[in-house]
Amino acid sequence: MDISGQIVLTALMAVFLFGVVLFLARAADWRTYTPLAGGGSGIVSQEGGYGHAEKPAGIFRWLTTVDHKDIGILYGVYAILAFAWGGIAVIIMRAELITPGIDVTQALAGAMGVSSGQNLYNGLLTSHGITMLFLFGTPILAAFSNYLVPLLIDADDMAFPRINAIAFWMLPPGAVLIWAGFFIAPFVESVAPSMASWTMYPPQSVEQTATGGAASSIAQLNAGTDLMLLGLHLTGVSATMGAINFIATIFSERGPEVGWDKLDIFSWTILTQSALILFSFPLLGSALVMLLLDRNFATTFFTTDGGGTILYQHLFWFFGHPEVYILVLPPMGIISYVLPRFAGRKLFGFKFVVYSTLAIGVLSFGVWAHHMFSTGIDPRIRASFMAVSLAIAIPSAVKTFNWITTMWNGKIRLTTPMLYCIGFVANFIIGGVTGVFLASIPVDFLLHDTYYVVGHFHYVIMGAIAFAVFAGVYYWFPLVTGRMYQVTLAKAHFWLTMVGTNLTFFAMILMGYAGMPRRYATYNLITVGPIDLIQTMHVLATVGAFILLVGQIIWLWNMVQSYLEGPRVGPDPWNLEEDGVDSREWDWFENRLETALTDGGEPEDADADA
Ligand code: HEM
Ligand SMILES: [Cu+2]
């Protein structure tokens, strides 16, 4: 890009950021609808006399809300949009991989303003990974925690309701920046979607041009990557603000009856997750800033004769490994919370589930170099990371045994949330055991950067995390909407998702054993490995991906249709009282039904406003 182009882009960027700042600054004047929450808003609400009943109608409510339940829903809608984006990206990639040569992405590249099919594939790969982890994974969990934690711990709202809103509103501009390469590429030749992959390793993340080669001057660099780094930074700040808020809320806003011994398992996992976010996201933030400086101001943090590329890997994985537990702990909390309801008894070994959560939280900071076994780091250091990586499987297994024991001889009801819980346990076992294999240095030497790794982490991320999300969505759907979903469609969704997940990712594990490297658009140049077998596995994986796609379309339809027209439910839609396993959020729900405040007002407000 020539220098005037750069200036125009910088000016646009500045205007955009200025707009974001202005928008956020306005937050200080937002009316608050939070009646009694901490953070000082109580005073405002008393003086202004605002209560829940005064929420403005329509779009304005959603733009100005500081109510934790509304913000939870915003996070959820945002995450589902991101899930769709990441899903479409991967469907194109899977279509490409049906045949060894380059075809589908080649056909699309021209129209999308990308210089070649391979580059488009790499752009989609990057966008898929980043979107699913940062724009879907963390936010969808924040949807649950925002909606539920205050209800579960008997708080009026989050400790800092406005910071909660600000944290959410950093995400939409973050997504726009992260995806910006795709929007700009058709119009500006020197800009392409970032092809740095989600790990963004230098030197290529520092040097790559829009056509995929190495730049000889800063002017040639692909601005798509800079925009993505800025967007990632926003999502990191957002997650950190959210984490601080949850820590403050769980420590200081618990109701009089909720002592530490009464804290529910989901809030425990959110507390641990928040601590992990607090200590790991700043590392990502600093690595991103250094990348930006290396790219734009010729610093040498990650150049071979400067700090070195391995420095980046340490910084990234010191964040990156805790990040995978940031993503998996709350889903484990959801499973630990929901599964016992349909086994008709309390969670087996509650204390051990809490302790293992805390243990995972601590240990997850001591394993990052298992992503770097093959970089040539000192073998003695490597061995200690292998030991801790094997050790972290123990608390994970403790949880698994607790879930199984909870179901053992239980009064199992195979509702859709329960099906997803059981699916979670099954898939998590495969995901965890393949992880233990990778933690062993000699095995990792063989399997590193093959599809085996891709299979491993997708068993956890799709097979377990997404399953827990679906378990939670179905379980709390009546709580949020007051209506029931269509059971037949939900079961169809479960089976399509279960079959699709296992078909796709087991095929990946096998083709990884056969030697198929990850992150390639083609495999017609592989000189080792049984190409026919590999292609068969790719075809199976693609078939699985399309089965998954069909399942998710059914799910979306079910959610929207049931939200609008589903049958209304009573105060105990899951018949939990019969088994004595009901919980606080359903009491709140009953209250809400009785006071008939559809937007979620508390009974006290109703009195005050009357
Ligand atoms: C049971 C404990 C686990 C162990 C021992 C383990 C071990 C490993 C190892 C050694 C690798 C590096 C493989 C390589 O690149 O050569 C790896 C990769 C990965 N694991 Fe796990 N894992 C475990 C659980 C998880 C969980 C719970 C998640 C997700 C929530 C996860 C997500 C990932 C991801 C995303 C990667 C790939 C990173 C990349 O290179 O892009 N793992 N795992
Ligand atoms: Cu790891």
Image: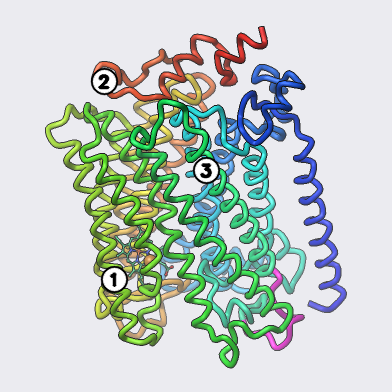
- Give the colour scheme shown: rainbow
Return the mark for residue 246: 3
Q: Quadrant of ligand 2?
A: bottom left
Judged by depth in the image, the label closer to the viewer, 2 or 1, is 2
Callout 2 crowding tier (Cα within 10 Å): few <14, some 14–19, many ≥20 = few
Bounds of the magenta span? 213-223
* Viewer-proximal residue among 16 and 54: 54
Return the mark for residue 589: none
Identified by mark 1, the residue type is Ala
Q: Is mark 1 within 8 Å of ligand 1?
A: yes
Return the mark for residue 580: 2
Q: What element does badge 1 sit on?
A: helix
Q: Is mark 3 within 8 Å of ligand 1?
A: no
> Is residue 441 found inside the magenta-colored segment of the image?
no
Judging by the rendered image, the residue that carries numbered circle 1 is: 439
Image quadrant in which you'd find residue 164: top right
Judged by depth in the image, the label closer to the viewer, 3 or 1, is 3
On the image, the x and y values in percent for residue 258 come to: 41, 30
Q: For the view shown, which residue lies furthest in the top direction? A: 610
Image quadrant in which you'd find residue 26: top right
| Marks 2 and 3, how far apart at CA | 29 Å
Question: Which of the marked residues, 3 or 1, is nearer the chain's N terminus?
Answer: 3
Is 320 displayed left or right of 32 in the figure?
Answer: left
Identified by mark 2, the residue type is Gly
Q: For the view shown, which residue lies furthest in the left direction? A: 409
**Residue at image x 67%, y 80%?**
294
Is 69 displayed left or right of 501 in the figure?
Answer: right
Callout 1 crowding tier (Cα within 10 Å): few <14, some 14–19, many ≥20 = many
Question: Which of the marked residues, 2 or 1, is nearer the chain's N terminus?
Answer: 1
Question: Which of the marked residues, 2 or 3, is nearer the chain's N terminus?
Answer: 3
Q: Is residue 524 above or below residue 130?
A: below
Q: What element does badge 3 sit on?
A: helix
